[in-house]
Image (cartoon, rainbow, N blue to C red):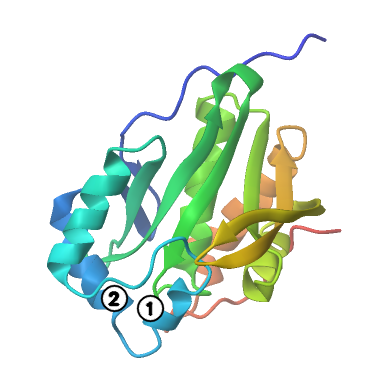
């Protein structure tokens, strides 16, 4: 069968789940994102990103204006319980003609790291890409030295595809890039497991998971 292109690039729309709300990144998110980035331990999480931790809310606003003028499409990740923006992520390498798209620019602040918010933020992107827009391929890339990111990709059901050696120079250092992907043929089984894990009855009164996400047989 002849492969089909995706319908379009993602539009600047809201994606909403049980716990997380993804909104197009805007200046109104600057104060929250600056605050979460500067919690104890927060700046260290910028080690693997292209940017450094912001030094002020004004610097965060300037960064938002900069990235919104670029080719990537960023969203803020809001905790529906508090209404606060706790992180951001972006659509990157947007290639509707090939049916391929990447999640990148991921900063999941410490309050949402390794939580249902992070998992749902990933799930909402994957579901929109595959189910709404008809993409064939959903990518995750990271510095090959970033072991937590590689572990997260595997936990979410991405398949490791290899390493592009000396792929980039980032913050003055050579970066080998690890590539991961999930495909449309794999998505139905992955979607079912994400939906099972994210169901409210899988969490206790303290928000702790009752069962683990199991995307691998």
The residue positioned farthest toward the top in the image shown: 2
Residue plotted at (49% across, 67% down): 116
Give x and y (percent) for residue 73: 38, 39
Q: Determine the image quadrant of residue 82.
A: bottom left
| In this picture, residue 9 sits left or right of residue 129 | left
**Label placed on residue 111:** 1
Q: Which of marks 2 and 1 is nearer the N terminus?
A: 2
Give x and y (percent) for residue 53: 34, 73
| In this picture, residue 37 sits left or right of residue 189 | left
**Label placed on residue 42:** none
Disc 2 versus disc 1: distance between alpha carbons?
Answer: 8 Å
Residue plotted at (38% across, 80% down): 43
Query: Can residue 7 be spotted in the picture?
Result: yes
Of residues 110 and 59, which is closer to you in this image? 59
Q: Is mark 1 on a helix, strand or loop?
A: loop
Of residues 217 and 171, which is closer to you in this image? 171
Residue plotted at (46% across, 55% down): 105
Q: Is mark 2 on a helix, strand or loop?
A: helix
Give x and y (percent) for residue 10: 43, 30
Of residues 176 and 140, which is closer to you in this image? 176
Give x and y (percent) for residue 96: 56, 22
Query: Can residue 211 be spotted in the picture?
Result: no
88 in relation to 135, above or below = below
The answer to whether marks 2 and 1 mark residues whose Cβ atoms lie closer than 8 Å is: yes
- Label 2 Cα crowd, 10 Å radius (few <14 / some 14-19 / many 20+): many
According to the picture, the residue beneath numbered tag 2 turns out to be 36
């Amino acid at each position: 069968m002849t492969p089909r292109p995706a319908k379009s690039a993602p539009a600047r729309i809201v994606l909403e789940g049980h716990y997380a709300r993804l909104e197009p990144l805007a200046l109104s998110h600057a104060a929250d994102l600056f605050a979460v980035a500067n919690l104890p331990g927060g700046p260290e999480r910028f080690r693997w990103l292209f940017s450094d931790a912001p030094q002020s809310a004004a610097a965060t606003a300037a960064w938002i204006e900069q990235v919104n003028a670029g080719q990537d499409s960023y969203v803020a990740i809001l905790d529906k319980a508090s209404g606060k923006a706790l992180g951001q992520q972006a659509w990157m390498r947007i290639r509707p003609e090939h049916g391929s798209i990447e999640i990148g620019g991921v900063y999941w602040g410490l309050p949402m790291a390794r939580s249902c918010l992070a998992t749902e933020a990933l799930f909402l992107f994957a579901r929109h890409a595959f189910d709404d827009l008809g993409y064939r391929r959903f990518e995750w890339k990271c510095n090959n030295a970033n072991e937590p990111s590689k572990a997260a990709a595997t936990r979410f059901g991405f398949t490791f595809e290899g390493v592009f050696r000396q792929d980039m120079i980032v913050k003055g250092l050579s970066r080998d890039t690890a590539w991961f992907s999930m495909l449309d043929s794999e998505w139905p089984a992955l979607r079912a497991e994400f939906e099972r894990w994210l169901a409210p009855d899988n969490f206790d009164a303290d928000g702790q998971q009752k069962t683990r996400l199991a995307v691998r047989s």
